[in-house]
Amino acid sequence: MPKKKKTTRKKGRRTRIKSRKSVSRKPTRKRVKRALRRTSASFPLKKPKGTFDILPEEEKYWQLIRENSEEIAKLYGFKRIDVPIFEQRELFERGVGPDTDIVEKELYTFKDKSGREYALRPEFTASIVRAYIENGMHKWPQPIKLFAIGPLFRYDRPQKGRYRQFYQFNLEVIGSIDPLIDAELIKVVLRIYETFGLEALNLEINSIGCAKCRPEYIKILKDYYKIHTRSLCRDCKRRLKTNPLRLLDCKEDKCSQLANRAPSMVDNLCDDCHIHFKKVLEYLDELGIGYNLNTRLVRGLDYYTKTVFEIWPKGVMGFSSQNSLGGGGRYDLLVKELGGKEMPAVGFAGGIERTIEEMKRQEVMIKEEKPDVFLAQIGDGGKKRALRFYDELIEAGFNVSANFSKDSIKSQLRLADKEGVKWSLIIGQKEAIDKTVIFRNMESGMQEIIDQGKAIKELKKRIKKESI
């Protein structure tokens, strides 16, 4: 009996202690600071999963792609358009397709304070078509050629060449059914990739028919796959009911083998689609553009009709969308689907990260612009005069390098050497008073004093002489 009482007391005591601990205490400023210090020490802040930083040494690739893609697009009559980073979720459900992986699994969605549902853009085309309709572009001379570049977002499993925030350059031609437009767009795309220094690229092309002939083909495809249902992966069993064309695009080994033996859409095209595709290929032949007819190529979005194509590096093994540097095709029904008049269109999206990976794989050399001149300074008076002279050099059109945080002339000239600059201009206390500049040839080490009023003219003369 005494033992029982002891146990009861222990239990009661334990209960009382527990109830004391459960009383919430107001978080004081000290406690918050302490908690933040502990958190920052054990969990340093990192970039979100599936994103990356573009560091200065990588910027040369990004700058080349940004500048060259837009320059070539402009040469062929494309005009720059920028659309919002987020749109109504419904735009992508109606445009991209409710049964696509993008809408079902990968959309980043959020609600605003009024409860409206939005999504970060997972691709450009739906947004550009929305802008085309909303801004009355159908009244403009057709076709309209539009170019876009920027970040996109998909909640995808991060892996090589696939990120949650990624970048694309985009070309869209809205307002023409002519198969010549398909071939012209492909020509522009290949021209853009040439300016990146990429060689040995394959054009993979197919036709996936239209609203007339595709239903019959899907029926044939379903009949083929129903016999092999047990061999399909879980996703493909679902796709068989919702989006059978995507079975041809599956990367799983068993599904891939089945897709290789599946009936071809090209063999089941209606007359209109057959003629259109035949003409696209004839135009490509006329332009001297080689291609590979890939009957498994369907692209992952519901809005595509007729021509679809992708750009692959040569020598890739097996079928996979991850081999693709970019892709596109026709979307003749999308403008009407999003509330506009029926308007045929064709577009392309190029993945920038994958393009950079391929540039590195092909060891593309990018010429980096080095400074024309290095401006060095000594002493407080020299620093003040050099600070003004720095702006004068820039206004005169020179690419100038300098480091005003360093006082030692040796360390400054060491930097000039490292940057491969031929001419260094030096302003010290004496030069500031005398209004002169020391010209130093970094290759020979020879120096001479020039009047500051003549320094810019003299520098231009010497640089021009060296470039001849």
Image (cartoon, rainbow, N blue to C red):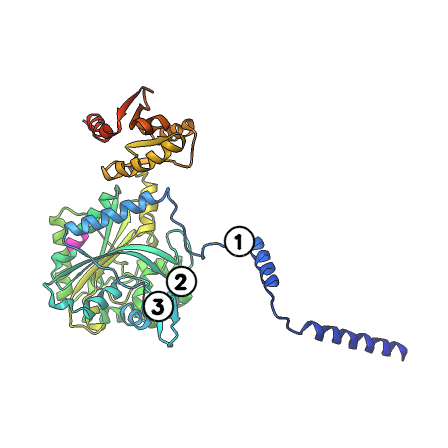
**Real-space CA distance between mark 3 and mark 2, rounded to the nearest whole angstrom:** 11 Å
Residue 365 visible in rendering: no
Q: Identify the residue shown where x is 39% and y is 56%.
A: 163
User: Are the two marked residues, 2 and 1, in contact with CB atoms closer than 8 angstroms?
Assistant: no
Cα–Cα span, label 3 and label 1: 29 Å
Q: Amino acid at mark 3?
A: Ala
Say what secondary structure mark 2 lies in: loop
**Residue 157: % across, % down:** 42, 59
**Crowding near the residue tagged with mark 1, few <14, some 14–19, many ≥20 C-alpha atoms within 10 Å:** few
Q: Amino acid at mark 1?
A: Pro
**Residue assigned mark 3:** 119
Can you name the residue that lies furthest to the left here? Answer: 141
Q: Are marks 3 and 2 in contact (CB under 8 Å)?
A: no
The disc, 3 or 2, on the residue closer to the chain's N-terminal end is: 3
Q: Position of residue 154 (x, y in %)?
A: 37, 62
Which badge, 3 or 1, is on the more N-terminal residue?
1
The quadrant in which the N terminus is found is bottom right
Residue depicted at x 22% and y 37%: 396
Q: Secondary structure at mark 1?
A: loop
- The one nearer the camera, 395 or 199, is 395
Residues rendered magenta in the picture: 183-187
Helix, strand or loop for disc 3: strand
Whether residue 184 appears in magenta in the rendering, the answer is yes
**Marking on residue 155:** 2
With 271 as the anchor, is 297 left or right in this view? right
Tell me the amino acid under the disc marked 2. Tyr
Q: Which one is nearer the viewer's eye here, 66 or 113?
A: 113
Q: Which residue is mark 1?
A: 44
Q: Is 113 in the magenta?
A: no
Q: Quadrant of the C terminus?
A: top left
